[in-house]
Image (spheres, rainbow, N blue to C red):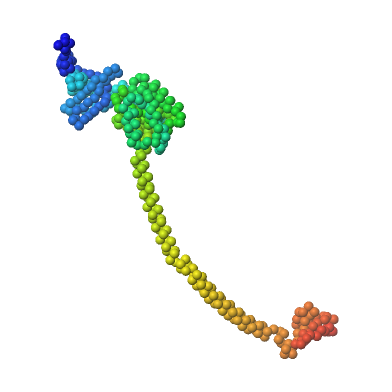
Amino acid sequence: MSDAETHSVSVSELTGHIKAILEGTFPSIWVAGEVSDVVRPRSGHVYFTLKDAQSQIRGVMWRTAASRLQEPLKDGQSVLCFGDVEVYAPRGTYQLVVRKVQMQGVGGLQAAFQKLQAKLNDEGLFDAARKRPLPTFPRRIGVITSSSGAAIQDFLKAASHRWRGTEIVVIPSLVQGNEAVSKLVNAIAAAHRYRPQLDALVLARGGGSLEDLWCFNEEAVVRAVAASKIPTVSAIGHEIDVTLCDLAADVRALTPTDGATKVLPDSDSLIRSVQNLGQRLRRNASYMLTSRRERLQALGSRTILKRPHEMVLNRTRQLDDLDARARRAMFGKIKLGRAHLASSAASLSALSPLQVLTRGYSVTLTEEGQAITNASDVKNGQRIQTRLNQGSVWSIIDSQNLSE
């Protein structure tokens, strides 16, 4: 047996020594920090991270202690936690088992988040009126994310089940840490230089703590997203994670997988829609053909189309009947008019002054043809005409007697 094997210890022994030293050195202690990554399983226990600007420690509150909280723990809260430092041997990690919590207000990162949010909101960067709709059938999509992260794999897997007719361009960038800010801004600028132009741009990253996602809350990145000329989708973190990029983007997705769902059409849904439309088209076409066929049959049964010559003969007979009736009516009217005319002529003849001449009377007229009824109407030497039943006589006035 070698000397190294003689003096070696097992992992469990080493962990046990560390546990004894750490837990024996640190009695119950108050620890100040900011809460993040709060998880509440159905067991009633509460798991969270307690952090400051440089470090973090995992914390746990067992169900009994958690039930005594006056208000539930929330991400971004600044708290004082009282408890014991404990080594969790199965994982070789240490954690703070918290028995009491005193609320101290909003943590530094949360305060910075709220301050920048209020500033950009006042500038109108989050206004709904600025939001643009995503193209229904995008030809090219840019995805800004870590090329080695799980987010791009989740996005591509979801995209493969949605729509295969779109080119996906991966634009690699850091998505965590201080250097990620400039990388993200440069990646957004690079996306605008692609030709043909991208139809949509997706920022994708998996879940994480507030610190892990903080680069998406930096002002430079948020302004770059808001100024993008390409419709943007923010698919950052999990459902409970909200960043300022989510508010500035045209569309917010809960996860990278949801981002693929938002930006790509659903081929299965479109296929079902096309099938439904096809069925409706066939039904409507069948109905129209049946309706037109029935109408054609109804028209074909009509006499005018079935026996058109017979209808012409019927119309001819009707026309002859009408012609005969018109002739009878016309001749009757003429006969009646002639009789009426003869009666009127007889009455007129009986009243005519010429008719009196046949009985031996005469009528005296001036040269102008006006009847003379008074002796004073003529003068000596004036020519007058006396009209008899047969012919007329012209005379010259020698004298007139006005007394008779």
Q: How many marks?
A: 0
Which residue lies at the image location 39% right of the left edge and 50% below the top edge? 281
The percent coordinates of residue 387 (x first, y second) are 77, 85
Which residue lies at the image location 50% right of the left edge and 70% below the top edge? 309
Residue 384: quadrant of the picture: bottom right
The percent coordinates of residue 66 (x first, y second) are 19, 27
Identify which residue, 33 or 87, lies in the foreground. Answer: 87
- Placement of the N terminus among the 4 image quadrants: top left
Which residue lies at the image location 36% right of the left edge and 36% below the top edge? 163
Identify which residue, 378 or 188, lies in the foreground. Answer: 188
The percent coordinates of residue 81 (x first, y second) are 22, 21
In the rendered view, would you say 261 is above or below 359?
A: above
- In the image, is 329 to the left or to the right of 384? left
Regarding residue 395, the answer to whether it shows in the image is: yes
Regarding residue 129, the answer to whether it shows in the image is: no
In the rendered view, would you say 285 is above or below 163?
A: below
The percent coordinates of residue 234 (x first, y second) are 36, 30
Residue placed furthest toward the front: 1
In the rendered view, would you say 176 is above or below 358?
A: above
Which residue lies at the image location 59% right of the left edge and 79% below the top edge? 331
In the rendered view, would you say 394 is above or below 15?
A: below
Identify which residue, 184 or 1, lies in the foreground. Answer: 1
Identify which residue, 36 or 270, lies in the foreground. Answer: 270
Residue 28: quadrant of the picture: top left
Residue placed furthest toward the top: 3
Residue 72: quadrant of the picture: top left
